[in-house]
Every structure is written in structure tokens, then in C-alpha cells.
Image (cartoon, rainbow, N blue to C red):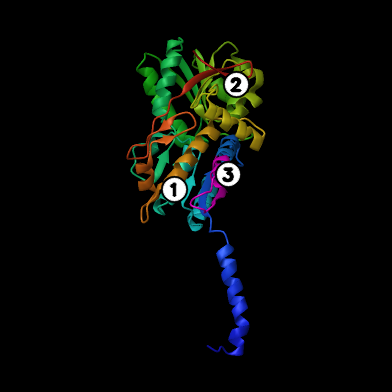
Amino acid sequence: MLFPRNQLLALPCIALAALLVACSPPPPVQIGFIGGLTDRNSDNGQSGLNGVTLAIEQFNRDGGLDGHMVELVVRDDAQNRETAAQSAKSLVDARVDAVIGPFTSGMAEVIVPLTGKAGIFQVSPTITSMAFYGKDDNLFRINRTTRDNARDYAKVMVERGQKRIAVAYDVRNRNFTESWLREFQEAVASRGAAVVAPVPYESSSDADFAKVVRGMLDKQPDSLFFISGALDVARLAQQARRQAPKLPIGASEWASTEQLIELGGDVVEGLLIVQNYDRDDGSERFRAFSDAYFKRFQVNPGYSSVSAYDATTVVLKALKMRSKGETLKVAALRSGPYAGLQQEMVFDANGDTTRKVFFTEIRGGRYMKLQ
């Protein structure tokens, strides 16, 4: 068969183009990340991003998703509602397959409706507010609820003789803090104790923490408790030690990061706080994770890292198990249980799960597990 001259000249180009297509790697699968990376309490978001990054890098080294590498699309919510909305819309426009985050309930209030409306499957490593519990939506949660944690705190604190408790709570993350406070008030009341001074404040660089603590002390409490991020808890503890050095102090799980000890130093010694993972776990799997995490980021993992790694495990397994035409949520529901770093994750029809926690006190600059 004879070809015109111009067609003959084009043949090598066509062959080269075909060869380039054949040699090109398959397009990546995109997963979104959204968390607070630049706000006052960015330690949670940064630590969470590290956990997600490590899980995806390990997954890709093992071959990815049938040869497709997983690519992470990172967005910052800056703990700001307007920024969170813009970042969520950006992930929707990018048509990511799933989203990991957000890391605070206040931002989830903005983000989840936007991603959910777009049909994007989302797994939050850390949010606990009752506003997201028992909902048939596209959101899975790795963490337990504010009700679970508040009830456990109430039991421990009342058994320690704390009956008149003053609470400071950050309204910048009010979806979480007000949910936590309500559950705690009910829980301590059922045990014959009371929150005698609930003191709201808004976290900022110029917040008057001395005034907040004075407000807590007005009702002559026998203990002080902070529903705040790590940076604020360190500053509140500093004022507590100045104004009422003998009163026991505690903080909600939101503050249980490495930054709390780094910033708090001596003033957070003796502080009661819960962890959603066992820092003293000596199992081979957790040691391997901790070693890999430190090698990659030169810092030790925290609770946000562990939860984010587990959340990524859920997303990646669901992607791997998804059948043609199946939504990722349906795939996630039928693909469990999931092997977390320390705990098995079993989700109900609403994407809720339970999680074992560990009470600690800060002693000698470390989180020491209560026996």
C-alpha cells in the first residue's frame, strides 16, 4: 500500500507519540488534605499532615493503587471560616477522590457541608463534637465523641475529690468546646459535682489570660479545667500557677500535643489530660511507625499524627477495594474492619467508631499514663 509523501513523513511522529503515551506513568489518584496549618493551634494540623504524608509515601512505595500513585492535594483552613470555605471549594474543584480532615469541629462545621454536597468521601482524624455523631453523610470519624471523653473526665476528676470545677473554653472552636462543656456539665452533675464557673474567651495573640483565670477563680473552685488548644493551655496554666498554685489543673484532649509540653514547661507539670493512643506502646508495628515518622520529620509523632495515619489507612484501603461504579463511602463501609496502628477500627452505618483512650499526667516533661 502506497502512502502520500506527507503521510510518510508523519509516521515517525505518530509512532513516537504512541511510544511516549505507552511509557507515560498512569495518572495519579488525588486525595485532599485540609487542616489548620497556619493558625495559633497549627500543631494539630501540621502533625496530622505529617501522618498523612507518611502513609501515602509508604503506600506509593508499595505500588500505589494498581500502579497509580496517590497524590496529596494540601489545603489550609487556618482556623478561619472564610479560609476554610475557600479551601474546601478548592478541593471540590480539584475533583479529589477523598478528603482527610478537618482537625477541629469548628472548621468541620464549615467544610463538611461543602464536601458532602459534592459527594466527596471524607475522614476526619480528630473531630469529636456531637454535631457530627450519628449522621448518615459522607463523613467518617476516627475519634470518639465529646460525650465519651467528657464522661470519662468527670469520673476521674470527681473520684479525685474535685467537686467545684471552673472551666475556661475557647469560643473560636465553639462547635467542639461548647459541645464538650455541655456533656461535661451533665456528667459531673450526675456525680454530685458541678461546673461552678464556665468562662468563655476567644483565642488570640492578645487574649487576657490573667483575666480569664481570675474569672474562673471568682466562684472559689477546687480545680481548673481548660477546653483549649495547646498554646492557650500553656498560657492559662501559667496564670493558674501564679494565681492559684495549689489548685489541680486539667485540659481536654484537644491540647494533648507535643507542643503543650514544649511551651508549658514547669507550669503544666501535674496537668491531667487524655490521649487517644498509647504513647508507651512497644509493639513492633507502632515502633516501626514511630521510627519511620522520626526519620522522615525529625520529630516524634503525636495523637494527631497517629489518628491521621489511621484515617489515611481507611481511605487507601477503601480506594483499593472499591468496585466499578461504587461510591467510596459504600466501599469503606464494606471494607472494614481496619487495622489501625494500635486499635482496630470498626465503623457503623453512619461512619462512627469507638476508640480506647488513656489518661495521663504530665510528669518530668512527659505524658505519664495513669495506672
Circles 2, 1 touching at the beta carbon (< 8 Å) = no
Q: For the magenta stretch, what is the residue range?
A: 52-76
Q: Choose the circle earlier in sequence order: 3 or 2.
A: 3
Q: Which mark is residue 320?
A: 1
Q: Label 3 to label 2, Cα distance in Å?
A: 38 Å
Q: As drawn, is 330 to the left or to the right of 82?
A: left
Local secondary structure at mark 2? helix
**10 Å crowding of disc 1: few (<14), some (14-19), many (20+):** some
Q: Is residue 59 magenta?
A: yes
Q: Is residue 203 visible?
A: yes
- Work out whether residue 358 or residue 249 is closer to the camera in this orientation and state it: 358
Which badge, 2 or 1, is on the more N-terminal residue?
2
Regarding residue 301, the answer to whether it shows in the image is: no
Please tell me which residue lies in front, 23 or 119. 23
Is tag 3's residue or tag 1's residue first in the polypeptide sequence? 3
What amino acid type is highlighted by mark number 2?
Ala
In this figure, which residue is indicated by the disc labeled 3?
Answer: 57
In the rendered structure, which amino acid carries the disc numbered 1? Answer: Lys
Q: What residue is rendered at 58% in x and 26% in y?
A: 233
Query: How far apart, in angstroms, are the residues tagged by discs 2 and 1?
Result: 46 Å
Q: Which residue is mark 2?
A: 237
C-alpha gap between disc 3 and disc 1 = 16 Å
Tell me which amino acid carries mark 3.
Answer: Glu
Front of the two marks 3 and 2: 3
